[in-house]
Amino acid sequence: MDLQKIKQTLNSRATEVFDKLGMEYEVFGDNIYSTCPVHESSDNPRAFSFSIEKGIWKCWTRDCQHQYRNDIFGLIRGALSKRQGEDVGFSKALKWACNLLDVKRTTTPAPLQDYSDEFTKLVNIFSDEEINKKSFTPVDLGELSYPSKYFINRGFKEETLNHFGVGDCNTPTSKMYDRAVIPIHDEDGKNIIGMIGRTIKEYKSPKFLIYPKGFNKCDVFYNYHRAIEHVNQTGTLFLVEGQGDVWRLYEAGIYNAMSLFGKTLSREQENKLHKMPLTHIIVLTDNDQAGRESKTQLQRQLNRMYKLTFPKLVAKDIGDMSIDQIKEKILPQVKGFNS
């Protein structure tokens, strides 16, 4: 399935893409300049650039390309997300592109003649994925043993793992067999909308398995439904990368913590932040190069709206720190702002 050919077609018709997105732009040779269509459009007119030859774009003020990818599909996703006020997935960006190129399921567009069958199949696949995603209900995972012995051996308390519903899957026919299973809830905490399975055998891959297929972890925060009450009370949020970081903070008496599921704050997650009664965000991304880059990006995204604090870690991540270390090294840096 040659997506590269499809992207080349969009790149060659980039001005049509920009026109459809409502962007005002200037063309200088191979480069197109504009204000950035992803964040507020109060930039100078050359804060955004797109290379037709390379098919990549860059926001020179906020690096918005890192959030949505720097190819033409990432640009479409970012601009549509800004317009609609919520994170737009790849499937919607693809269908938007289909409409622009006048690609129908029953027709063959001239510029994509040699690739039309594969392109149409791709549209159908993504459309079906979206329907299945809406109708998702958790499957029977088989027998889970609580609490997870795997994470107990990683140093977490039994009562913590029971509190977060983390168990090990022992059923050979289950998709999560030989994995420690972490449930992901909706904002009300009433339904499980997804789950992460961490392999308990290091030779088994992938290391992390997300179910259901197509679940977009960028749409939610882990632990939102438990933490939001404490966020409402304190006006403060501890923002971390992983689920284990949330658990360790919980053991240290910090209950207003949510996980990004990684190092990047998506547009949908940022919109959720803006709906919270927040004044202060304490960022505890990992103590490595990627974590430091994450801090820089989060500062660019959030420093106009919130007070930001970046405590220094004494380990690779919060999950690897002891409770005493958190209380002695982290909490004094944010005195008065924990739950």
Image (cartoon, grey):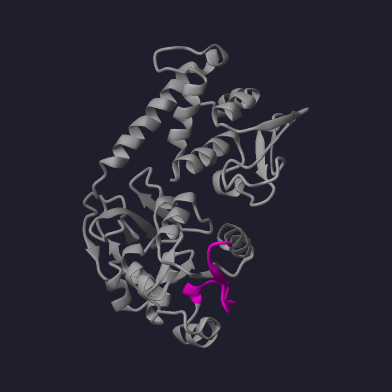
Front one among 51 and 199: 51
Observer able to see residue 154: no
State whether residue 74 is above or below residue 232. Answer: above
Front one among 70 and 38: 38
Front one among 256 and 191: 256
Residue in the image at 47% along x and 87% along y: 324
Residue 313 among magenta residues: yes
User: So how many labels did they put on this image?
Assistant: 0
Residue in the image at 36% along x and 57% along y: 197
Instruction: Give how far across and how far down residue 294 sits, in percent.
Output: 59, 60
- Give the residues in magenta: 304-320
State whether residue 237 is above or below residue 66. Answer: below
Residue 221 among magenta residues: no
**Looking at the image, which residue sits at the far front?**
42
**Looking at the image, which residue sits at the far right?**
29
Q: Quadrant of the C terminus?
A: bottom left
Left or right for 127, reference 294: left
Front one among 104 and 2: 104
Observer able to see residue 268: yes
Left or right for 247, reference 12: left
Most common SS among magenta residues = loop
- Where is residue 164, by image quadrant? bottom left
Residue in the image at 30% along x and 38% along y: 132
Residue in the image at 50% along x and 79% along y: 321
Left or right for 288, reference 53: left
Left or right for 24, reference 101: right
State whether residue 83 is above or below residue 189. Answer: above
Instruction: Give how far across and how far down residue 241 sits, in percent.
Output: 49, 64
State whether residue 58 is above or below residue 140. Answer: above
Instruction: Give how far across and how far down residue 120 sits, in percent.
Output: 43, 21
